[in-house]
Image (cartoon, helix red, strand yellow):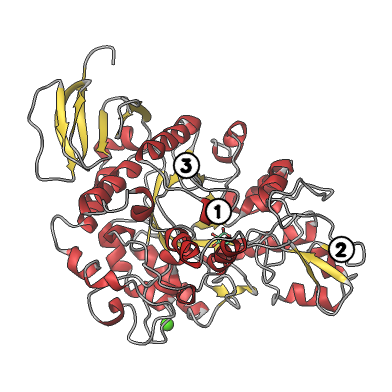
Amino acid sequence: MERQWWHNKVAYQIYPKSFYDSNGDGIGDIPGIMERLDYLKYLGVDILWLSPVYQSPLADQGYDISDYYKIDPCFGTMRDMEALIKEAKKRQMYILMDLVVNHCSDEHLWFKKAMADPEGEYGNFFYLADQKAGRPCNWRSYFGGSVWEPLPGTDKQYLHMFHKKQPDLNWENPKVRQEIYKMINWWLEKGVAGFRLDAIINIKKALPMKDYPADRPDGLADAGVMLAHAEDIGEFLREMKEETFQKHDAFTVGEVFNDKPEELAAFIGEDGYFSSMFDFRETVMGTSPKGWYDSRPVTGEEYKQACFESQEQSGDLGFYSNIIENHDEPRGVSHYLPEGQVCEASKKMLAGLYFMLRGIPFIYQGQEIGMENVDFQSIDEVDDISSRAEYQVALDAGVSEEKAMDAVRRYSRDNARTPMQWNGNCHAGFTVGTPWLRENPNYRRINVEEQRDRRDSVFQFYRSLIALRKNPEYEDSLIYGKCIPYLREQKNLMAYFRRGENKTLLVMGNFQEIPQKVKLPGVCEKVLINNMDWVDDGTDREMGLKGWQYVVLEMRMQDGL
Ligand code: GLC
Ligand code: CA
């Protein structure tokens, strides 16, 4: 496979609003990111994905953009953004912007013009329909309710797959596509290294629109059903790539939920539409079509099998981007580790297991210090629109308030959106003002200052994982090598080889509290990483792992293996 500049990189997602506040207004900002670049450099990450900082009414925290060419004043200025790009470059770091082009904000000029003159040029920038004919289809928006909303001051209605303040752009209109490509190129010329492509799979609708069988008492159908019927998205994606990313050798990572195995090569193969896309197989496990209140916890076994299925699917045809959390998910350690078992050892094990898979590892801010879910007491403490909608879905289904809050505690996106925990001082050192969202009270225990120089901290463990991935000696195995499951049926053991031309590494995690023994397929030459001080010096043929122990071994394999 042809080598690309991003293959051996490690990425880090910044949620700017909650990262670091430089001016005391309670909102994280771009100068704040700049102040923390050296911290990120010390951690060892290269690619920095910024969740949206464009001008926005922030109805969905910036995923509702009212001007793609402006920085929202709460985050800083265009000058700040340019300075950030420059400072990042100085440190051999790359900035990714979030590309939100399935929809814009209802406060975008295009939408205002569409409202003023629905029959005019900008009416066709959106999906509009006459009100009097009723709803054109019964699709449910991702944030609840119908995707159709009256277009204020007109006899029309418009489509929104997400919140009603996020009208969908009509990609079938070539003028829309040209406007988008122009904007992408403008940012690439400014020096950003690429984009994370938000909700990108939604840009192609199944047309003509029609109803699908209702799947809840509201008479609506899950949007995913429509997506499964949409065809030929590839035409848009290829055009976008050729008109923009390709010319700049940009790195792109797609947010794709409904990936179809037979299409993977077209998406992330050598000549794919994107450089990479997120592997969400683990994150959707346990979810229920009824809503969060009906979802169930994920076991270690399920987690392992999901990871392996994705690895098998991609094989060496391309690179997934691997995560345990992001700004739309609860904290990975709270989600994947059993309740009552979340400790530094198990956090490190989980980190190590996903980190050595084939693909690009993404770290979400705070993950590197093991930040955990929040113990929200009431829905009033929650800001996120989707959490509030899910809370209502639960109540509507007859679930008690306490149970509905349980679901929010387990799945709320705000679990990941509380301020970054820099130190044990007031507001976790995030701001000298009042944070826009209350910090997780556990910041006194879990924070950067406490971990940075502690040899056995979660933070230092992440540093060692990154360092190993970057060690040129292991590039052949850890970056380009095959990922081959080992002892897949052994319960609560997640083990796999990363096999290159010259070296074979064995990655193993004991996904349980009690110890277990593992047969070795060859001789361990070197322990490259260990999340404990102890290593079993048993025999050449067998190794004992303590509860939550994680190791990476360099192996001398027996012939034929
Ligand atoms: C993506 C984003 C999410 C946002 C949605 C709508 O899923 O990650 O935060 O709400 O798209 O833009
Ligand atoms: Ca600020």
Q: Check residue 320 in the rendering and tell me which mark sits there, or answer none.
A: 3
Q: Position of residue 243 (x, y in %)?
A: 66, 52
The answer to whether residue 313 is visible is yes
The residue tagged with tag 2: helix, strand or loop? strand
Q: Which residue is mark 2?
A: 129
Q: Is residue 136 left or right of residue 316?
A: right
Q: Quadrant of the C terminus?
A: top left
- Marks 3 and 1 sit apart, C-alpha to C-alpha, by 21 Å
Q: Which residue is mark 1?
A: 248
> Observer-nearest residue: 495 or 330?
330
Which badge, 3 or 1, comes first in the chain's sequence? 1
Q: Position of residue 171 (x, y in %)?
A: 75, 56
Ligand 1 within 8 angstroms of badge 3 C-beta: no
- Label 1 crowding class (10 Å Cα cut-off): few <14, some 14-19, many 20+? some
> Observer-nearest residue: 277 or 106?
106
The residue tagged with tag 1: helix, strand or loop? helix
